[in-house]
Image (cartoon, rainbow, N blue to C red):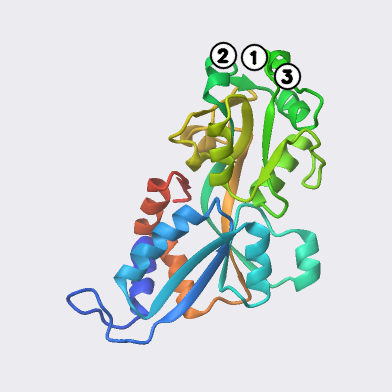
Amino acid sequence: MIVALAIGSVLAFSGCLGEDGSSASTRATVVKVAGSTTVMPLVEASAEEFNRLQDQARVSVSGGGTGVGIKNVAEGLADIAMASRDVKAEEIATYGNRFVETLVAYDAIAVVVSQPIADAGVTGLSRDEVKAIYAGEVTNWKEVGGPDERIYVVSREVGSGTRDTFNEMVMGRAEAETPGVTTSHGSNAEVKTAVTRSDKAIGYLGMNYVEGGALQAIAYQGVSPSDEAVKAGSYPLSRELHLYTFGEASPEARAFIDFILSEEGQKIVLETGFVPVR
């Protein structure tokens, strides 16, 4: 019944649909969504289907990172923010405590290495080992059971929710310094490219970005990232993915969020490599 009501609310706000799936209305309201590149694939896929089902609202999606999304939604530049972390205390202090959070999926941060490093025997690392690599205390793969090669350390840029979550869970706090980092990138896709183009890299990215390319997700604290491990709570780098509005959502934005939470939307969550909340 809950699923049926959720789907109904998506279609009801747009009026009656014609036989070709179009709405009687010809004036579409644009719903702007911005933020986390981790959440972006599931929101883009959901927006494509949502836009197909009706034509009173058109959802447009852009990235920029969690910090950008939260800033944009608070300043009225976006209707919905995509976030791979909670709103920070300093963001609430800056913009006010009007953020409304909706949990839409579960994800995990995968620690990945270049395929030659995995083939050489590095298929798992402890938290202490990963922390030491990013802190610059371990600089050669032979120190953690790999080949005699200098470690090429890849990270996300400041403002990334993935970076903040990684730093908090691995380094001890979101604002931790990571002097061992060789290069930083603005998106999960860029991290993946950097790791796959190297033969001696380590990096971290959203679990749904792991498939394809010359890289391998390794076990962290003895547990490999998987849907089952995320659902069970046994993978240490699991996290929640959220959508935020600033104050009450507009009817069109609410309808889109409800669509993602519907049975159809949660199927899209699964198809895009995330773990559904329902």
Amino acid at dot 3: Asn
Determine the secondary structure under disc 3. loop
Q: CA distance from mark 3 to mark 1?
A: 8 Å
Q: Residue 80 placed where, x, y %?
A: 56, 69
- Report the number of numbered marks: 3
For the question of whether residue 1 can be seen, the reply is no
In the rendered view, tell whether residue 78 sits above or below residue 153: below
Q: In the drawing, does residue 188 fall left or right of residue 136?
A: left
Tag shown at residue 120? 2
Q: Residue 160 placed where, x, y %?
A: 67, 52
Amino acid at dot 2: Ala
Q: Residue at (38%, 53%) from the top-left corner?
A: 268
Q: CA distance from mark 1 to mark 2?
A: 6 Å
Q: Earlier in the sequence, mark 3 or mark 1?
A: 3
Q: Say which quarter of the image contains residue 255.
A: bottom left
Is the N terminus in the top left, top right, bottom left or bottom right quadrant? Answer: bottom left
For the question of whether residue 43 can be seen, the reply is yes
Q: Earlier in the sequence, mark 3 or mark 2?
A: 2
Determine the secondary structure under disc 2. loop
Q: Residue 177 placed where, x, y %?
A: 82, 41
Tag shown at residue 146? 1
Q: Are marks 1 and 2 in contact (CB under 8 Å)?
A: yes
Q: Residue at (53%, 32%) from the top-left corner?
A: 196
Q: In the drawing, does residue 275 fall left or right of residue 23?
A: right
Report crowding for label 3: few under 14, some 14 to 19, many 20 or more residues within 10 A (C-alpha): some
Q: Earlier in the sequence, mark 1 or mark 2?
A: 2
**Mark 3 — residue?**
140
Tag shown at residue 65? none
Q: Residue at (32%, 75%) from the top-left corner?
A: 54
Q: CA distance from mark 3 to mark 2?
A: 13 Å
Q: Residue at (70%, 55%) from the top-left corner?
A: 159
